[in-house]
Image (cartoon, grey):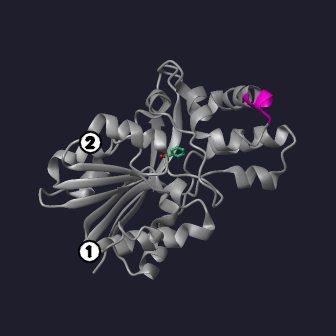
């Protein structure tokens, strides 16, 4: 959930309720990354971009303890409310600056896990490498970094439609690009970058995984665009945002809707991997 494109404290766009309405599938579609995590009862795990803790909950019973960190105070509050126990700690940390968190990056963690968060955290080019270096420094030697995030081409249809809606309202293409809060790297970029930091990349894969949108009230495509696209929509004056959301939904209608049942799907691309600190 960690996200922002400047060095300012991030505006908190998140609410656990809105996330649940529009993206409840995110912590559920995690079978492979949990299999790669391979949690063990003795392990201390750092969860980078833990959000509201719903993903953490999946492996919590199988490890010794978890520290969940996220830049969103609203999500950390929800995680503390729902998953407070002797094994958990949740802290508000802007993970872009992980390298400065000396109490966390102490070479003591057995595993670092991150699910559906690194595309926000790595958005800002100026802190991209240092955030990954922070993860490397956090691990003990022999420890593993296990991650899943959006990969190259992820949700390209909706990202493009939002950018177009901004441009149609007079925003320059440069500003529209700059407002895009995500970095979706290729497997090649990620492997090369992790290796340049010192990791041994044991597994890296890019998977096209079309994902069904929710049908919850306030969810669906409109809910997704409002929540996930909030930073892009913020570029517009408030009174123009709802017409932009409407345009995005209308433009995408054909591309996202399946003929057999009218369900709506986005073209998610997952980048998944295991990188070891030797
Ligand atoms: C993702 O998990 O791939 C994702 C989530 C929100 C916005 C964009 C991408």
Outermost residue on the right side: it is 170
- Which quarter of the rendering shows the C terminus? bottom left
Start and end of the magenta stretch?
237-241
| In the depicted structure, whether residue 49 falls above or below residue 75 | below
Residue 140's label in the rendered image is 1
Q: Quadrant of residue 107?
A: bottom left
- Kindly identify the residue that appears in the image at 35 percent across and 67 percent down: 103
Would you say residue 172 is visible in this rendering?
Answer: yes
Query: Residue tagged by mark 2?
Result: 57
| In the depicted structure, whether residue 64 falls above or below residue 31 | below
Please name whichever residue, 243 or 139, is drawn nearer the observer in this view of the structure.
139
Q: Secondary structure at mark 2?
A: helix
Q: Is residue 153 magenta?
A: no
Q: Where residue 190 appears, x then y in whole percent?
A: 48, 69
Mark 1 Cβ inside 8 Å of ligand 1: no
Dot 1 or dot 2: first in sequence order is: 2
- Kindly identify the residue that appears in the image at 47 percent across and 59 percent down: 95
| In the depicted structure, whether residue 214 falls above or below residue 30 | above
Decide if residue 110 is on the left or right side of residue 132.
Answer: left
Would you say residue 151 is visible in this rendering?
Answer: no
Decide if residue 72 is on the left or right side of residue 45.
Answer: right
Q: Where residue 65 appears, x then y in whole percent?
A: 20, 54
- Kindly identify the residue that appears in the image at 25 percent across and 48 percent down: 88
Q: Where residue 131 appears, x then y in whole percent?
A: 48, 68
Outermost residue on the front side: it is 103
Q: Where residue 262 appears, x then y in whole percent?
A: 52, 20
Q: Quadrant of residue 105?
A: bottom left
Q: Secondary structure at mark 1?
A: strand
Give how far apart the Cα atoms at labels 1 and 2 are.
23 Å
């Amino acid at each position: 959930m960690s996200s922002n494109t400047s060095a300012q404290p991030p505006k908190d766009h998140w609410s656990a309720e809105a996330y649940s309405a529009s993206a409840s599938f995110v912590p559920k579609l995690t079978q492979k990354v949990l299999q790669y995590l391979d949690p063990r009862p003795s392990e201390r795990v750092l969860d980078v971009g833990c959000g509201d803790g719903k993903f953490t909950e999946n492996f919590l019973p199988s490890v010794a303890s978890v520290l969940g960190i996220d830049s969103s105070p609203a999500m950390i509050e929800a995680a503390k409310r729902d998953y407070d126990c002797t094994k958990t700690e949740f802290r508000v940390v802007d993970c872009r600056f992980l390298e400065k968190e000396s109490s966390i990056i102490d070479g003591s963690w057995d595993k670092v896990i991150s699910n559906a968060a690194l595309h926000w955290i790595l958005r800002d080019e100026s802190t991209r490498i240092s955030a990954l270096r922070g993860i490397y420094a956090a691990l003990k030697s022999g420890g593993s970094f296990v991650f899943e995030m959006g990969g190259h081409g992820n949700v390209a249809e909706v990202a493009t439609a939002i950018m177009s809606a901004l441009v149609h309202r007079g925003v320059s293409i440069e500003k529209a690009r700059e407002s895009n809060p995500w970095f979706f790297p290729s497997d090649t970029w990620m492997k090369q970058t992790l290796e340049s930091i010192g990791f041994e990349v044991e597994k890296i894969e890019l998977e096209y995984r079309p994902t069904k949108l929710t049908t919850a009230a306030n969810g669906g495509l409109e809910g997704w665009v409002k929540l996930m696209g909030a930073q892009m929509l913020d570029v517009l004056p408030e009174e123009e945002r709802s017409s932009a959301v409407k345009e995005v939904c209308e433009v995408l209608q054909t591309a996202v809707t399946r003929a057999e049942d009218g369900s709506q799907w986005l073209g998610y691309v997952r980048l998944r991997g295991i990188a070891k600190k030797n």
